[in-house]
Image (cartoon, coloured by chain):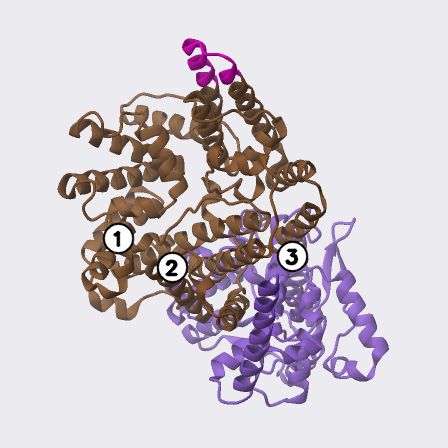
Chain colours: A purple, B brown
């Protein structure tokens, strides 16, 4: 017993010494990659506070992709657009969609693009952006709704902060759920603007309501990612938090992905209703709708092609599924950061142009 | 409920606390209930199978002890074998054999239609059926007294730490531990905790982190020979860390409660020949196959040719034990052929590695042999991991035309830094165990150094525990 206690005491002391040493090394001469690795384990409030305190910090995602700001920018561009201008391809998506349509533009330089996106944005973000941007599109324009397999499991979330633990960009978006009339109910987040985000520290009422909403309604919210931010001082605690939070978030996403039709977030039905509404609105406005299904490299993601392609074909909705042109199981198709290789994007871009041309033949440009 | 998930540790904390406060008899009842809860958490529908197998073997064991009529005893043994092998046959092999038969008939131009069973393979079925069969055979051979108390016997069959992936315990080892009062000691707790910690590092920090790279290679359509080689080396590491990690945790958890489960791995990749490998790899299965299959077939007592046939048969069936697929049969055949060849050219004793372990680090020749035999083992893992005959042929051809320059340009994601740390720690652990010849080599170290070692292990575990827990590979067997 005495020996065991002695060993436990020695272990604890050694752990504390290791932790203090790690903290000193991380504060000083540690390589940037190691610092980043340990930083990933900070609590979400800790990371956001760090970004707020250091606006010039590399990789600061604090003021990125807030929907009202994107719409203000879109309105400015729409106002500056001359009458009778060439049709514009409005993309609502994320970096994958930007890269594919940029590759299409490279092949056809007269293609006019307007990107509205967010990092790893889930379909609820892209669909909400499409809805809010309605006034800024014109008849004859093209609307592209990007759906990324990686973020489909996060469709029950209000913000990347709850499900992208390592890069919790705080921009927000609504959650859409099926209603009884065949449409979608929209749940708006309590925090909708960058200004509200910045005021959270000084507005405990807003902060309280916001965190209550996240805890109660965000289906991917993991307490381990948010609670006890003061523990961020310990590198060891950051490692433990990272493990717990990542595991919890992955588990919640997996639960959602496992039940596409009848889970707490019936995402297959929500996606079908989003796409139906997207097509109806775009056509009503004399625009060409194109759905872009982007399959990422992670095999745990839902298979978008299997999930939606038969239905899209049946409904006659124009779409491009990246999995039709490149197997996501071939690692050589991807860059280390998870995006597709430029030559693969070029292939997708060409395929996009073909889909666009076919859709234009069916729907002559309105003027 | 995976050992690498928090759920299991909450479960174990409750079980352990109850275990500490309950008297001996109730400890066993509680452990039996806990074991059924643990198994039921996978799929409660298969609890009936365990219960059925338990009742049959318990009754057969009692009946065997009550009769000396050899014919009657043989019939009783047959009942047990048919029951256990029948369960395995239906749940694990039925569709495989039917599918193979239909494919063969198709190949011969005959159209055969036989319905397949739409059933899920019960987790751990190969482990617990082998465990109960060993009990009945031992009682039949009069090497073991049958268990009188049904609940003790039921706990022997279902003991949760080793229920789903072994070690495949012998009744002569585990039953006495169940039947006699056990003592929980600080020493047992600390030794168990160390086993759990090293097991978690193997599983979570190494095996789970390596897994995506291995899956990538074995999912590629046109990998380079270098990618196949690296993917297979990593699979060798993955399957070792995954399976031995599970065993370490199982032994650790049992150790904390005062049970001593058998050692299942003894630094297998330090083997220099197939005989030595099978003395170090999945020891509970290899000794089971030796004692209940190889020896029953006649072992080495009936001449050279028959010994070779017995070896091949044992290893092919051992391969099939791993799964209902032809690549496991091929892997078993490959291992059998290696054993036969080794026996043919080097005899039974020569090169077995006994007495050489401690000189490992001082003997360059042995190191070279270890590296060389590791490649032989790895080719076996390629057969084991491949998804089709075509892939085996394709990957083999790519290995045969491997170019060194391809290693400089591998189309694979690099291993995460924590995984590399974990691999180095596991390597250190195995070298220290091998070099000292002691499983608990650290116990002779000063307390302060030991404390530092535990702290480093705990830190390393936290450092690498960032991947999503995945199921242990051997659960599917």
Label 3 marks which chain's residue?
A
Q: Position of residue A307 (x, y in %)?
A: 56, 49
Q: Which residue is mark 3?
A: A252
Which percent across, then down, holds residue B88? 46, 28
Question: Residue A124: which disc?
Answer: none
Q: Which residue is mark 2?
A: B433
Please say whether residue B411 is visible from this viewpoint. Answer: yes
Crowd around label 2: few <14 · some 14–19 · many ≥20 (10 Å): some
x and y percent of residue A164 in the render? 61, 69
Q: Residue under label 1, please give it.
A: B355
Q: Is B186 placed above or below B1 here? A: below
| Foreground tag (3 vs 1) | 1
Frontmost of labels 3 and 2 is: 2
Q: Quadrant of residue B402?
A: bottom left
How many other residues sit within 10 Å of disc 1, few (<14), some (14-19) or many (≥20)?
A: few
Task: Point out the stretch of residues depicted in magenta.
Answer: B63-79
CA gap, disc 2 to disc 1?
14 Å
Do we see residue A91 in this rendering?
no
- The majority secondary structure of the magenta stretch comes to helix
Q: What residue is at 35 percent from the left and 32 percent from the top?
A: B291
* Image quarter (top left, top right, bottom left or bottom right) of the C terminus of chain B: top left
Instruction: State the residue in front, A144 or B171.
Output: B171
> Is disc 1 placed on a helix, strand or loop?
loop
- Secondary element at image label 3: helix
Question: Disc 3 and disc 2: Cα gap in Å?
Answer: 40 Å
Q: Quadrant of residue B187?
A: bottom right
> Which residue is depicted at the point 21% across and 63% down?
B363
Q: Magenta stretch: residue B64 in it? A: yes
Front residue (pair B143, B87):
B143
Q: Is residue A160 above or below residue B68?
A: below
Query: Which is closer to the viewer, label 2 or label 1?
Result: 1
């Amino acid at each position: 017993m005495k020996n065991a206690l002695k060993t436990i005491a020695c272990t604890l002391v050694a752990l504390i010494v290791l932790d203090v040493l790690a903290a000193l090394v991380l504060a000083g001469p540690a390589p940037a990659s190691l610092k980043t690795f340990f930083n990933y384990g900070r609590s979400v409030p800790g990371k956001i506070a760090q970004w707020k305190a250091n606006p010039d910090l590399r990789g600061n995602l604090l003021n990125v992709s807030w929907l009202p700001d994107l719409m203000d920018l879109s309105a400015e561009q729409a106002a500056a657009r001359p009458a009778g201008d060439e049709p514009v391809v409005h993309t609502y998506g994320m970096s994958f969609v930007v890269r594919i349509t940029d590759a299409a533009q490279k092949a056809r330089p007269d293609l006019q693009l307007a990107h509205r996106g967010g990092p790893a944005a889930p379909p609820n973000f892209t669909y909400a952006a499409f809805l809010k941007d309605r006034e800024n599109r014109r008849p004859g324009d093209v609307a592209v709704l990007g759906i990324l397999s990686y973020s489909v499991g996060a469709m029950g979330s209000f913000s990347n902060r709850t499900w992208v633990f390592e890069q919790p960009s705080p921009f927000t978006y609504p959650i859409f759920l099926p209603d009884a009339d065949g449409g979608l109910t929209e749940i708006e987040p309590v925090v909708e603007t960058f200004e509200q985000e910045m005021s959270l520290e000084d507005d405990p009422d807003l902060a309280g309501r916001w965190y209550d909403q996240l805890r109660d309604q965000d289906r991917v919210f993991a307490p381990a990612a948010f609670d006890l931010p003061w523990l961020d001082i310990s590198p060891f605690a950051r490692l433990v938090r990272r493990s717990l939070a990542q595991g919890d978030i992955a588990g919640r996403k997996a639960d959602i992905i496992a039940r596409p039709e009848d889970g707490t977030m019936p995402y297959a039905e929500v996606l079908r209703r989003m796409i139906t509404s997207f097509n109806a609105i775009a056509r009503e406005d004399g625009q060409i709708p194109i759905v872009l299904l982007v399959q990422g490299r992670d095999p745990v993601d839902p298979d978008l092609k299997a999930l939606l392609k038969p239905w899209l074909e049946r409904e006659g909705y124009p779409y491009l599924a990246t999995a039709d042109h490149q197997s996501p199981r071939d690692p050589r198709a991807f860059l280390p950061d998870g995006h597709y290789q430029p030559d693969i994007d070029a292939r997708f871009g060409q395929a996009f142009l073909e889909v666009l041309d076919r859709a234009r033949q069916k729907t002559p440009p309105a003027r | 409920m995976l050992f690498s998930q928090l759920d299991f540790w909450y479960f174990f904390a409750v079980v352990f606390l109850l275990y500490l406060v309950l008297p001996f008899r109730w400890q066993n009842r509680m452990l039996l209930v806990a074991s059924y809860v643990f198994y039921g958490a996978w799929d409660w529908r298969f609890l009936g199978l365990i219960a059925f197998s338990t009742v049959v073997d318990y009754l057969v064991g009692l009946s065997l002890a009550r009769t000396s009529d050899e014919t009657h005893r043989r019939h009783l043994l047959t009942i047990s074998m048919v029951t256990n092998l029948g369960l395995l046959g239906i749940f694990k092999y039925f569709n495989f054999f039917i599918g193979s038969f239909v494919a063969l008939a198709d190949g011969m131009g005959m159209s055969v239609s036989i319905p397949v069973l739409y059933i899920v393979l019960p987790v751990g079925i190969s482990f617990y059926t082998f465990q109960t069969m060993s009990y009945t055979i031992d009682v039949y051979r009069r090497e073991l007294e049958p268990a009188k108390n049904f609940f003790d016997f039921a706990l022997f069959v279902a003991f949760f730490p080793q229920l789903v992936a072994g070690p495949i315990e012998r009744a002569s080892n585990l039953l006495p531990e169940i039947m006699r009062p056990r003592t929980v000691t600080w020493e047992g707790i600390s030794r168990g905790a160390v086993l759990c910690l090293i097991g978690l590092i193997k599983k979570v920090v190494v095996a789970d982190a390596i897994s995506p790279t291995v899956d990538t290679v074995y999912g590629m359509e046109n990998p380079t020979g270098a990618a196949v080689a690296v993917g297979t080396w990593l699979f060798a590491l993955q399957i070792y860390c995954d399976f031995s990690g599970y065993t370490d945790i199982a032994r650790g958890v049992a150790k904390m409660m005062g049970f001593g489960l058998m050692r299942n791995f003894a630094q297998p990749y330090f083997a220099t020949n197939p005989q030595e490998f099978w003395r170090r790899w999945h020891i509970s299965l290899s000794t089971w196959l030796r004692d209940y299959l190889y020896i029953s077939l006649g072992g080495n007592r009936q001449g050279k040719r028959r010994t070779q046939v017995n070896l091949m048969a044992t290893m092919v069936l051992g391969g099939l034990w791993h799964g209902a697929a032809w690549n496991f049969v091929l892997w078993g055949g490959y291992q059998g052929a290696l054993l036969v060849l080794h026996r043919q050219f080097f005899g039974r004793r020569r090169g077995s590695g006994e007495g050489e372990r401690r000189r490992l680090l001082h003997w360059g020749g042995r190191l070279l042999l270890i590296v060389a035999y590791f490649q032989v083992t790895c080719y076996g893992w390629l057969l084991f991991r491949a998804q089709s005959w075509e892939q085996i042929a394709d990957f083999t051809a790519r290995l045969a035309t491997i170019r060194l320059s391809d290693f400089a340009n591998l189309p694979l994601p690099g291993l995460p830094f924590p995984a590399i740390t974990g691999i180095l720690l596991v390597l250190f652990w195995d070298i220290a165990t091998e070099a000292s010849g002691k499983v608990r080599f650290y116990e002779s170290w000063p307390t302060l150094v030991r404390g530092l070692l535990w702290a480093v292990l705990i830190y390393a575990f936290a450092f690498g525990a960032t991947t999503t827990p995945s199921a242990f590979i051997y659960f599917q067997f």
